[in-house]
Image: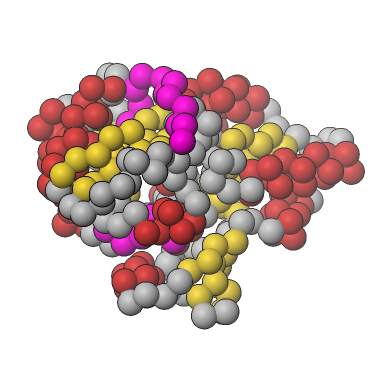
Amino acid sequence: MKKYVIIADSTCDLDADILKQYDIDYAKMGYVVDEKEYPAALEWDVISANEYYNMMRSGKKIRTLQVSGETFKEKFNYYIEQNVDILYIGCSSALSGSVNLGAIIARDLMAEHPEVTIRVIDTKISSLGQGHLVLTAARMRDEGKTLEEVAEYIESIKLTVNQFGTVDSMEYLKRAGRIKASKAFFGNLFGIKPIIISDVIGQNYAVKKVKGSYNSKLEIAKSVAECVIDSENQTLYISHADCIEEANVLRQEILKLAKFKDVYVNYIGPIVGASVGPGTLIAYCVGKEVTIEGKE
């Protein structure tokens, strides 16, 4: 079987140790603060997660950059030169143009190098929902599955990855244009917490609202418990924007309602973080297939 590599991008929100353990590469996006550009590194080796979110808390505006064409070419060509095939598992195309650009670059490179296969998957999700699919692919590869077998399986299950999250402030999502919901829904936001899913086309959609931070955690826990399938044989994923104490409370509330094999908690990375803001909490599980499409 020909060797292949699994490549994610900066929105998968997996930590450096996991990326290394499962031999997962990723294409870096970027972000701009005060006209200075930084790599969106999941290792947080340039600016720490706490420093990053404190910049947002202090009012700094952060602009994000998708994976550039040059970055894709450099990353893909590195493996092409080693005669290694590529499976790129990217962020939802409803949230970033990276996966579509990656597909264009892949098509052009395969025309130049017909001996190489590059598969590109639009996961229709981001953060640790995408991260779960990336890890699933890496484990299947390590079990000896072919690139095509892995790609087809990830395509078949991606809409079973459910997201339930809430934000501390709607300001960032609204500014970034990363939320779909009616104006009436957000007519009175004082003390109101939206519950946000990733819908069938991969956009963030507020499906309901609750009063208060603690009640939002209870609602997320309830939503996870209602949709999850075979929880005892899967990992619960929780990503947070520099609010680990709140993430631990959410973890406890979910585990009161559903037993999971294990729990993986990590920071929301710089790209997703710029769109959701500090204090955001998101839970991911595998369950009923997502069918909702958000409408204005």
- Determine if the magenta segment contains residue 56: no
Which span of residues is magenta-colored? 273-296
Instruction: Between residue 72 and residue 144, name the one nearer to us.
Output: 72
Task: Spot the residue most to the right.
Answer: 112
- Determine if the magenta segment contains residue 276: yes
In the picture provided, is 167 more to the left or to the right than 201? left
Which residue does the image show at 50% across and 35% down from the upper left?
A: 202
Task: Spot the residue most to the left.
Answer: 256
Q: Point out the image quarter for the N terminus.
A: top right
63 is higher (above) or lower (below) than 69: below
Residue 243 spot, x, y in % from top left = 23, 59
193 is higher (above) or lower (below) than 260: below
In the picture provided, is 51 more to the left or to the right than 244? right
Q: Is residue 131 visible?
A: no
**Count of all numbered marks drawn on residues in the image:** 0
Instruction: Between residue 114 and residue 108, name the one nearer to us.
Output: 108
Which residue does the image show at 23% across and 36% down from the upper left?
A: 220
284 is higher (above) or lower (below) than 214: above
Instruction: Between residue 125 and residue 252, name the one nearer to us.
Output: 125
Residue 185 spot, x, y in % from top left = 32, 40
Which residue does the image show at 60% across and 22% down from the upper left?
A: 152
Q: How is the image coloured?
A: secondary structure
| Snapshot quadrant of residue 150 | top right
| Snapshot quadrant of residue 196 | top left
Q: Is residue 255 visible?
A: yes
Which residue does the image show at 45% across and 71% down from the upper left?
A: 61
In the picture provided, is 103 more to the left or to the right than 268? right
Residue 294 spot, x, y in % from top left = 45, 32
